[in-house]
Image (tube, coloured by chain):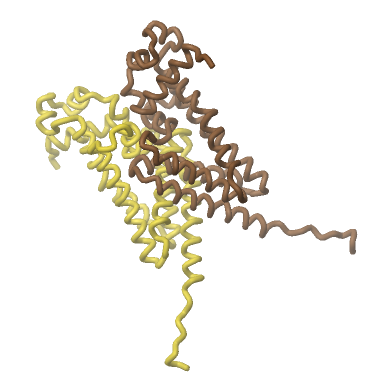
Chain colours: A brown, B yellow
């Protein structure tokens, strides 16, 4: 499959931005890695800000698809499947080239620019994950589906941040245990509230 | 109280690094803000890397003291006191100048340099918080004190990351609820295991 010039540029930028950070990588470095002139680079992306946004946009669907695949590929109930996302993430975080979450690291670098286009792409990506969790919880009849979905996000994004700091992926597994416990508790409390309606017709 | 030149430099660097990020701030900018020459700046800090480490080192004790103060200043049991840390953090995150956790943002920027001196200061800071939690849990007789301490850290650092992304401090309160539930569950399971030893002398 042939890649377009634009795709080649985003692929080069992704490697560099994820590997080194946003501000450390110049547009010259991206052009060189992509094998294009600066003029061609700026023809496709009118600013570095746009290219940073395109980098995150390019990771949006593949990342969500990978998480969904990890979730679907596990035997067991909802709590087991959600824990599995953390276990698989821990495996990938043990790769020497792993450097945390590109979305969160970009956010951290751009903290002084809340309106930056990449911040919007990052926030939208994380909201998609949160909504996926919320729908799963609603589907299981959990009343506080939104807070629970947010707690899973907090544990997941905490996993990225803490593991990057300590270079210890076992934190992600510990986060998975917390997620498991919180989902199990929510499922159990749902069962307590599920009182069978009295069948008057049989009386 | 008179401040030393070194303290003035760290104070200026802290404002700039926390406000703008590490790589966006030049040594020239730090010298200018501190009101010293570049020569004086390099007399006190032989490299920017050292200054970044000094910036984080300067936040280590004050941050831990603030968390300890929030914890101690709350009525109630362990779970309530830990939740209070999150509630107070949410309050401070609503300040317009809040830009997340300086330790984590620095880590995110320096992800490609795991041996950077600032990474070590950051990791040591977070371990101190984790150890504080662990000791609290051990003091209450919770068996799995370390995993629980780490889960609190994951929720706390997740709070910083997610709130910075969405600019929505209510996530920190949601993290506090999760922390509360996990601590309560650990305390309750401890009580289940605490079987009074049979007093043989009275038989």
Residue occupying the point 22% across, 38% down: B117
Q: Position of residue A192 (x, y in %)?
A: 66, 60
Q: Quadrant of the N terminus of chain B?
A: top left
- Which of A67 and B166 lies nearest the eye of the viewer? A67
Residue lying furthest front? A1
The answer to whether residue B159 of the structure is visible from this angle is: no
- Asked if residue B35 is positioned above or below residue B67 in the image, the reply reads above
- Which of B59 and B187 lies nearest the eye of the viewer? B187
A176 lies left or right of B9:
right
Q: Position of residue A183 (x, y in %)?
A: 57, 51
A128 lies left or right of A192:
left
The answer to whether residue A28 of the structure is visible from this angle is: yes
Q: Position of residue B63 (x, y in %)?
A: 30, 46
B55 lies left or right of A56:
left
Residue occupying the point 57% across, 42% down: A71
Residue A164, picture quadrant: top left
Residue lying furthest top? A39
Residue occupying the point 45% across, 58% down: B80
- Which of B65 and A149 lies nearest the eye of the viewer? A149
- Which of B169 and A196 lies nearest the eye of the viewer? A196
Residue lying furthest bottom? B203
Residue occupying the point 43% across, 18% down: A51
Q: Position of residue B16 (x, y in %)?
A: 27, 29
- Asked if residue A162 is positioned above or below residue A61 in the image, the reply reads below
Residue B28, picture quadrant: top left
Q: How many marks?
A: 0
Residue B140, picture quadrant: bottom left
- Asked if residue B91 is positioned above or below residue B141 in the image, the reply reads above
């Amino acid at each position: 499959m042939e890649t377009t010039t634009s795709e080649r540029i985003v692929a080069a930028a992704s490697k560099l931005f994820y590997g080194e950070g946003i501000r450390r990588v110049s547009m010259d470095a991206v052009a060189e890695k992509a094998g294009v002139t600066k003029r061609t680079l700026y023809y496709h992306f009118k600013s570095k800000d746009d290219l940073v946004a395109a980098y995150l946009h390019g990771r949006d669907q593949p990342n969500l698809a990978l998480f969904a695949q990890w979730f679907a590929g596990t035997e067991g109930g909802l709590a087991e499947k959600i824990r599995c996302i953390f276990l698989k993430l821990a495996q990938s975080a043990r790769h020497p080239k792993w450097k945390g979450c590109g979305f969160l690291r970009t956010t951290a670098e751009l903290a002084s620019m809340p309106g930056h286009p990449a911040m919007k792409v990052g926030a939208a990506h994380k909201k998609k994950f949160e909504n996926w969790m919320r729908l799963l919880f609603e589907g299981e009849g959990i009343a506080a589906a939104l807070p629970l979905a947010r707690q899973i996000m907090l544990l997941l994004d905490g996993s990225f941040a803490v593991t990057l700091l300590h270079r210890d992926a076992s934190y992600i597994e510990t986060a998975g245990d917390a997620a498991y416990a919180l989902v199990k508790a929510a499922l159990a409390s749902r069962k307590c509230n599920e009182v069978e309606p009295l069948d008057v017709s049989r009386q």
